[in-house]
Amino acid sequence: MRRILKKGILISVLYIMICLVDSSVYASDQQIKPIKLKSKCIKQNPLVANQTDQVLLGLYQQICDKPSVQQTNDLLAQAAMRMYELKQPMNALTLANQLQQQNVRGATLTDIVFLSSIEIANGALQHMKGEEMRYLSNDLTYPPAKQLSENIRIAQPAPDTSNIKAITDESLKKEMQQISNTRRISNKQRVQVSQPVRKVVNQTVNSKRQTTAPTGVNKQSNSVVQKTSASPFDALKQ
């Protein structure tokens, strides 16, 4: 009986494992299976013809399932962005223009038009320089390119201020305290520097006084000597 039970358990375990393997293989096959759009869907959306990207085909598959108008517009905008990512700026620009002509607006469409136009312009400029061996002309192509460059400069992103600390009362107090400390230190340094200067000035003044005093005495002594000197005719008078 035990052997029969063991065999039965082993068979059941093997059966479960086989079922799990089959289900995983079936799921992987379902995932790998490429998306194929219906001819009616391609006819209604000619830009998707000859496309092989599964993400783009998946978007159009949802579009052809007839969702709401808002969902359809959102999916078409995503499809236009996907075309730009696939280096198809002309298709992306065409689809974005079609949506804008239907009064569909949004930041995504604006970005698609801007990015696709720049991609097309860069391609034309590289072709002009590399293949045609010429540059922009002063009267036709350079002025709008210069204007675009100026507009891009004006519309450049603002600097990142995420690392800048916010100004608070505490930060202002700390800054004022630092300023007052630096002023005190500078005042102390001025006092320390001015004291030796005063000492030197006093020493020089005293030395000058000491040197000028004897000269005065000498002048007095000379004057006295001159007054008391005897006349050369005194001997004759006697």
Image: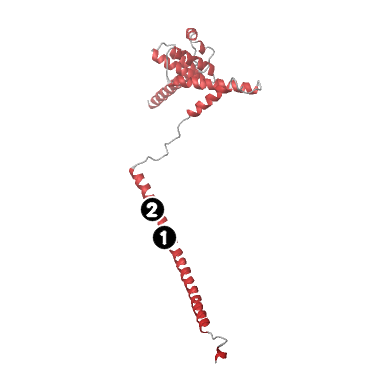
Q: Secondary structure at mark 1?
A: helix
Q: Nearer the viewer, residue 139 or 100?
A: 139
Q: What is the x, y in percent for residue 186?
A: 42, 55
Q: Which residue is mark 2?
A: 181
Up/down of 45 relative to 210, above or below: above
Counting labels gives 2
Up/down of 182 relative to 202, above or below: above
Q: Are marks 2 and 1 in contact (CB under 8 Å)?
A: no
Residue under the point 39% across and 50% down? 179
Q: Which residue is mark 1?
A: 191
Q: Quadrant of residue 24?
A: top left
Q: What is the x, y in percent for residue 173?
A: 34, 47
Up/down of 213 relative to 182, above or below: below
- Packing grade of label 2 (10 A; few <14, some 14-19, many >=20) is few
Residue under the point 51% across and 10% down? 46
- The residue at the far left in this view is 169
User: On the rendered structure, is 231 left or right of 4?
Assistant: right
Amino acid type of disc 1? Val
User: On the rendered structure, is 106 left or right of 131?
Assistant: left
- Looking at the picture, the colour scheme in use is secondary structure
- Packing grade of label 1 (10 A; few <14, some 14-19, many >=20) is few
Of the residues under marks 2 and 1, which one precedes in the sequence? 2
Amino acid type of disc 2? Asn
